[in-house]
Amino acid sequence: MDTLLNIVQTILGMGAVVILPIMIFILGLVFRMKIGQALQSGLMIGIGFQGLLLVIGLLMSSIKPVVDYYHTMGGGFTTVDIGWAALGAASWTVPFAPLAVPLIIVANVILIKFGWTKVMNVDMWNYIHFLIPGALAYALFDSFALGLGITVGLSIITLFIAEKVAPHWEKEFGLEGTTCSTLSFISYMWPIAIILNKIIDAIPGLNNFELDLNKLQSKIGFFGNPAFIGLIVGVLLGVITHQPFATVTMIGMGLAGVLLLIPRMVSVMMEGLTPIGNAANDFMQKHVSPDANLWIGMDVCLGLGHPTCIVCTAVCIPFTILLAFLIPGMSYFPIGTLTSVCYITVLCVMASKGKLVRSLICCMVSMFLIVWGANQFAVEATAMINSTNLHVEGLITDAYFGFSLPNIIVCLLHRLIA
């Protein structure tokens, strides 16, 4: 078991930037693509994904002076927000992780073979969305079997939800042949946003109030460009937090660059995804059914290039910082949570059909629930971390405990039983 765990951790240690192209290349060969075509698809997807991660890194480094300013003001923050990357990496060290990975892959293949799903989930790094709730159950209930069962079970549930998401995903983001298989967002953020849209529909005045980004940009020209929006938000954040002039300009240019580059990186990924999607559908129609279509399950980040997602990200970053001081009893400052803001916007935008005002309302309500939830379940988050190879002193938390429905359910069940 230790040998298998070491192999899995070594592979995953290469990171999603390496794992994703390898998975796509292998998948391309399975779907009878030529070696050169499969290699090119994997390479373009890997380059696009790496570029996207670099842009998110630029986002965090750009707003770091703002975060530092507010963090020093909040002397009462006693819980540490460790961020999704650290929590996700820790989840791979639980004892059942080596068994979970092959079981997840085999289950996906069997379900496709028998025609029970049309989704092939290649997003191996995001198995953390199954492993984190499994690791949480393992820590709280001290059960290897329960942790493994929850992990594999969630991977299967994801395929069915991703299939429901696929038509909406393709229509709103134009990502033909793909769907979102990032469990936490499709199982929680999407339903919440749908409910919020129904509430908005019932409010006279608000239900018909909308700002059309395309019309707005055509009227105000470059001032409606995402780069300009990022520049203005960045400069305002710098001025409000009393940064030196050089820092203010750095924050402004950083956010401007982020909002301009995100769609470019997504388009690079799509250069690789389009051929693999076509090959997958040709393969399914030939070997499964003439009417069969296969969707490739991908990371939620593919939707980040949507103009409404970009605007919502720019608005929700300062809003999330503000929540640290508005929510009563906050014990942590959402440093790590800020890295999740852009991802939260995607399913809110999809549920709102790209409408800006509705999307903003959904994103802001979602961010409130996420920050509040992460604050409520810090004890459980700390127990989960301490059950892995990453031991901590004091309390920690992460946005996963606010935007992952399985995590919330496991935490509530434990509190009821305990």
Image: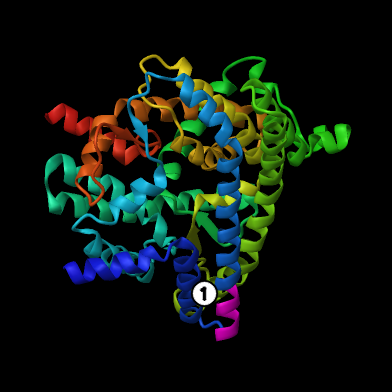
Residue 158, percent from left and from top: 38, 52
- The residue pinned by badge 1 equals 285
Q: In which quadrant is the C terminus drawn? A: top left
Out of 282 and 232, give the one closest to the viewer: 232
Q: Residue at x 46, y 77 (%)?
A: 26
Q: In which quadrant is the N terminus drawn? A: bottom left
Q: Is residue 200 above or below residue 67?
A: above
- Kindly tell me whether residue 114 is visible in this rendering: no
- Kindly tell me whether residue 99 is visible in this rendering: yes
Q: Amino acid at mark 1?
A: Gln
Out of 372 and 354, give the one closest to the viewer: 372
> What span is colored magenta in the figure?
34-41
Q: Is residue 354 left or right of residue 180?
A: right
Q: Is residue 153 above or below residue 342?
A: below
Residue 115, percent from left and from top: 39, 66
Q: Is residue 165 on the magenta stretch? A: no
| Residue 205 lies in quadrant | top right
Q: Residue at x 29, y 30 (%)?
A: 377
| Residue 83 lies in quadrant | top left
Q: Is residue 336 above or below residue 120?
A: above
Residue 363, percent from left and from top: 54, 31
Q: Disc 1 on helix, strand or loop?
A: helix
Q: Is residue 40 on the magenta stretch? A: yes
Q: How is the image coloured?
A: rainbow
Residue 258, percent from left and from top: 66, 45
| Residue 230 lies in quadrant | top right
Q: Residue at x 50, y 36 (%)?
A: 338
Out of 32 and 273, give the one closest to the viewer: 273
